[in-house]
C-alpha cells in the first residue's frame, strides 16, 4: 500500500480514534521525510530535531482537522516548513539580542556548512545545501520528495509559474556547479 | 557510440536518499515526542483536577457564607482576607484543598493492558498421536478508578491489543475431526465477530497442529507452530516460529507442513532492523548452534521473547531432517535492541536491587511511561506499586496469576487514553457498555 492510501482513514476519524497510534504510524511512515526537509531548510541537525518534535506535536493537535485536501506527506511538509521558518525567525532575534546587530552572523553560517561538509552523504547534497533557500527547497521538494509543481506551489504559497521558474534556475545552478567540478 | 547521460536523471538519483550519513528521525527522537505528549496530557489532567477542586471549594464556600449568620464561625483564612467570599473564591489556599486528610501521593494516570498465555497438555490414548498441546489466553486492564484507586478494570479471555485506531482481538480456536486436532489463532478487529475456520480432513492420516502466541505489541505478533502427523506408519514432527503483522495472522494459514511450503506472510528481521540484521546474522552463522545437519539463519524465522525487564529479539537457526519428516529450530539471542516500532514502550526505570528490596523473589517488572506505576512479577503474583525511588511500602493492588502463566503483551495508556481504554476493554473483554470508570 503506498503512503497516500495508507492514511486515507485520517479523513474519517471519529472521537474514539486512538490518536496516539495514528501519530505513531505517521512518525513511522514520514518521520524521516519531516526530519530531512527540516534539516535541508535550517542546515542544523539540532534545529531539525527540535523542529521535528514541534511538527509532530502540532500534527497531533491538528489530526482531527485533516480532511484530505492534500496528501498526508504534503500536509506534513507544509507544517514542517512553517515550523522551521518560525524557529529561524525566533532564533535570529535571540541571536541579535545576544550578540548585538553588529555581531558575527557569518560565524553561525560557516559552522552549518562545516557540518554539512563533514556529514553530507554525497557531493550533490553538499552543493544543494549551499544554494539559497528559495532554490534549495524547490529542488528538494521536486527531486527528493517527487512532488508535483502544484503540490510544491501549495506548500510554498507561490504560483505554479514561480515554482517552475525557481526550479529551472535551481537546476541550472546545480548543473553549473557540477560542471565546474 | 557512447551513451549520453541525462543530467536530470543523475540529479534525481543522487538526491533520492537522505542528506546526511547519520541522524535523521531516530527512535530517541520518537521517544522524546511521545514523552512531551505524555507531559502535556499530565499537565492538562492536573489542571482539570485543580479546576474541579477549586470550583468545588468556591461552591462550598459560597454556600457556607450564604447560610452562615455569625462571622465568628468563619474560618481564620477568610477573616484575614478581604471581606466576603470574593477573596476566598479568587485564591483558594493549599490547606483548604487538602482539607483534613493527609496530602495524597501523586495520582496514577496510567493503565496497563497485559496479556497472558497458559499452556496445557491433554492426553488421548485412543489416538496414535496421543498428546495434544494447546494454550489459553486472557487479558487484564489495570487502571485507576475515578477516585484514583487502582483496580482490575476489565478482564476477559483472548488477547486484546491496540492497533492503529482500533482494538484487535486474538483468540485461540479449535477444529477437530475423528483423526485431527487443530488449535489455531485468529485475529480480528474487536468490534467484528470471530470467524471459525474449517480444514480439510485427510483420510488415513492423523494430524495435530497447534499455534502458540508468544508476543503481541504495536503491529507485530510472534507465533510458534508445532505439528505432529502420522501417515502410513511414518511419524513426522515440525516446529516453526515467525513474526507477522497482526493483520497477517491466519491469512494464508499453512496446515499439514509436510505437504506445503512455508507461510509467505511474515516479517523478517531485515524488515525491522534493516541491513544491521544481516550483518549480525552473518557473524552468528560463523558459529552455528545446530550440529550434524544443514541449518539456516537468514532472518526469516525469529521471535520476540521476554527477559527480566525487557523484550528481546531471538533469531531462529532452522534445520530440516534429510527425510523431511522433521523440522525445528534453535533460538539465538540477536543482541540488538528492539526498535520502538516493535515494542511500544519498553523501558524499566527501576534498578533490580530496588525491585528486589520490596520483592526478593521478583522475576520481571514493568514501569509506566509516566513513571507513576511499577508492576512486579514474583511467584504467581503480580504486584502493582506507586512508582517511587526507592520502591517501598505495600502494593496498591495484588493480582493472582495462574500457575505457569506467561506475559505475552504489555501496553500502556496514559492521560486521557485511560478512560477510553477502560470503556473499550470492558466492551471487548466483558461485553459490557458501562462507559467511563467506576
Image (cartoon, rainbow, N blue to C red):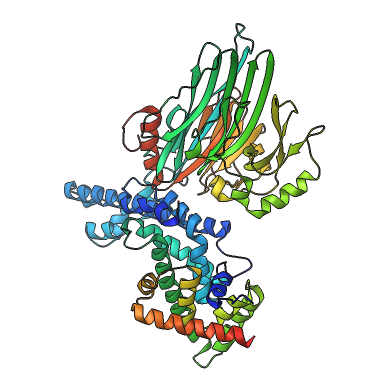
- Taking depth in this image into account, of A146 and B359 the one nearest to the observer is A146
- Taking depth in this image into account, of B301 and B192 the one nearest to the observer is B301
Q: In the orientation shown, which residue stands out farthest toward the bottom? A: A102
Find residue B429 and report its horizontal and vertical position in percent: 41, 30
Find residue B153 and report its horizontal and vertical position in percent: 41, 33
In the displayed structure, B48 sits above or below B232; it is below
- Taking depth in this image into account, of A39 and B279 the one nearest to the observer is B279
In the displayed structure, A142 sits above or below B38; it is below
Find residue B377 and report its horizontal and vertical position in percent: 60, 33
Q: In the orientation shown, which residue stands out farthest toward the front? A: B1
In the displayed structure, B24 sits above or below B291; it is below
Q: Is residue B101 left or right of residue B246?
A: left
Identify the residue shown where x is 61% and y is 24%.
B404
Q: Is residue B229 left or right of residue B85?
A: right
Q: Quadrant of the C terminus of chain A?
A: bottom right
Q: Quadrant of residue B413?
A: top left
Q: Quadrant of residue A76?
A: bottom left
Identify the residue shown where x is 45% and y is 82%.
A168
Amino acid at each position: 500500500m503506498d503512503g497516500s492510501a495508507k492514511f486515507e482513514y485520517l479523513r474519517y476519524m471519529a472521537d474514539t480514534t486512538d490518536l496516539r497510534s495514528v501519530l505513531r504510524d505517521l512518525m513511522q511512515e514520514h518521520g524521516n521525510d519531516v526530519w530531512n526537509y527540516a534539516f535541508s531548510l535550517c542546515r542544523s541537525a539540532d534545529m531539525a530535531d527540535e523542529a521535528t518534535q514541534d511538527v509532530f506535536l502540532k500534527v497531533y493537535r491538528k489530526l482531527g482537522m485533516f480532511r484530505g485536501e492534500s496528501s498526508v506527506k504534503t500536509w506534513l511538509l507544509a507544517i514542517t516548513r512553517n515550523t522551521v521558518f518560525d524557529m529561524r525567525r525566533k532564533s535570529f532575534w535571540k541571536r541579535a539580542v545576544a550578540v548585538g546587530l553588529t555581531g558575527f552572523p557569518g560565524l553561525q553560517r560557516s559552522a552549518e556548512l562545516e557540518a554539512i561538509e563533514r556529514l553530507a552523504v554525497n557531493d550533490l547534497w553538499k552543493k544543494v545545501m549551499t544554494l539559497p533557500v528559495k532554490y534549495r527547497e524547490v529542488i528538494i521538494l521536486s527531486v527528493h520528495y517527487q512532488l508535483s509543481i502544484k503540490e510544491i506551489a501549495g506548500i510554498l504559497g507561490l504560483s505554479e509559474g514561480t515554482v517552475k521558474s525557481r526550479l529551472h534556475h535551481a537546476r541550472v545552478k546545480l548543473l553549473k556547479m557540477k560542471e565546474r567540478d | 557510440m557512447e551513451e549520453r547521460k541525462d543530467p536530470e536523471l543523475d540529479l534525481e538519483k543522487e538526491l533520492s536518499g537522505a542528506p546526511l550519513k547519520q541522524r535523521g528521525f531516530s527512535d530517541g527522537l520518537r521517544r522524546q515526542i511521545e514523552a512531551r505528549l505524555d507531559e502535556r496530557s499530565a499537565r492538562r489532567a492536573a489542571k482539570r483536577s485543580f479546576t474541579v477542586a477549586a470550583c468545588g471549594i468556591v461552591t462550598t464556600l459560597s454556600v457556607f457564607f450564604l447560610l452562615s449568620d455569625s462571622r465568628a464561625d468563619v474560618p481564620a483564612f477568610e477573616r484575614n482576607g478581604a471581606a466576603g467570599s470574593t477573596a476566598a473564591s479568587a485564591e483558594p489556599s493549599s490547606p483548604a484543598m487538602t482539607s483534613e486528610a493527609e496530602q495524597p501521593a501523586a495520582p496514577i494516570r496510567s493503565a496497563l493492558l497485559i496479556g497472558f498465555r497458559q499452556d496445557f497438555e491433554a492426553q488421548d490414548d485412543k489416538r496414535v498421536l496421543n498428546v495434544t498441546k494447546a494454550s489459553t489466553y486472557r487479558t487484564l486492564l489495570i487502571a485507576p478508578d475515578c477516585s484514583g484507586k487502582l483496580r482490575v478494570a476489565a478482564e476477559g479471555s483472548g488477547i486484546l491489543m491496540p492497533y492503529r485506531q482500533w482494538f484487535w482481538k486474538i483468540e485461540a480456536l479449535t477444529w477437530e475431526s475423528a483423526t485431527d486436532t487443530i488449535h489455531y489463532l485468529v485475529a480480528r478487529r474487536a468490534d467484528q465477530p470471530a470467524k471459525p475456520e474449517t480444514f480439510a480432513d485427510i483420510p488415513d492420516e492423523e494430524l495435530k497442529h497447534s499455534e502458540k502466541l508468544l508476543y503481541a505489541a504495536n503491529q507485530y505478533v510472534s507465533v510458534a507452530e508445532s505439528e505432529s502427523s502420522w501417515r502410513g506408519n511414518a511419524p513426522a514432527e515440525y516446529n516453526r516460529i515467525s513474526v507477522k503483522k497482526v493483520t497477517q495472522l491466519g491469512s494464508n494459514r499453512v496446515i499439514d507442513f509436510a505437504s506445503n511450503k512455508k507461510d509467505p506472510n511474515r516479517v523478517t528481521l531485515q524488515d525491522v532492523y534493516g541491513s544491521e540484521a544481516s550483518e549480525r546474522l552473518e557473524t552468528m552463522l560463523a558459529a552455528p548452534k545446530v550440529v550434524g545437519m544443514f541449518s539456516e539463519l537468514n532472518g526469516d524465522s525469529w521471535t520476540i521473547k521476554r527477559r527480566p525487564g525487557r523484550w528481546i529479539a531471538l533469531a531462529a537457526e532452522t534445520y530440516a531432517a534429510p527425510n523431511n519428516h522433521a523440522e525445528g529450530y534453535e533460538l539465538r539471542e540477536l543482541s540488538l535492541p528492539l526498535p520502538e516500532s516493535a515494542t511500544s514502550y519498553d523501558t524499566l526505570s527501576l534498578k533490580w536491587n530496588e525491585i528486589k528490596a520490596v520483592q526478593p523473589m521478583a522475576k520481571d517488572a514493568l514501569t509506566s511511561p509516566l513513571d507513576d506505576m511499577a508492576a512486579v512479577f514474583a511467584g504467581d503474583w503480580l504486584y502493582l506499586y506507586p512508582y517511587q525511588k526507592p520502591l517501598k511500602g505495600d502494593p496498591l493492588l495484588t493480582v493472582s496469576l495462574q500457575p505457569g502463566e506467561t506475559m505475552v503483551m504489555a501496553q500502556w495508556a496514559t492521560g486521557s487514553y485511560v478512560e477510553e481504554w477502560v470503556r473499550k476493554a470492558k466492551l471487548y473483554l466483558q461485553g459490557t457498555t458501562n462507559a467511563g470508570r467506576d
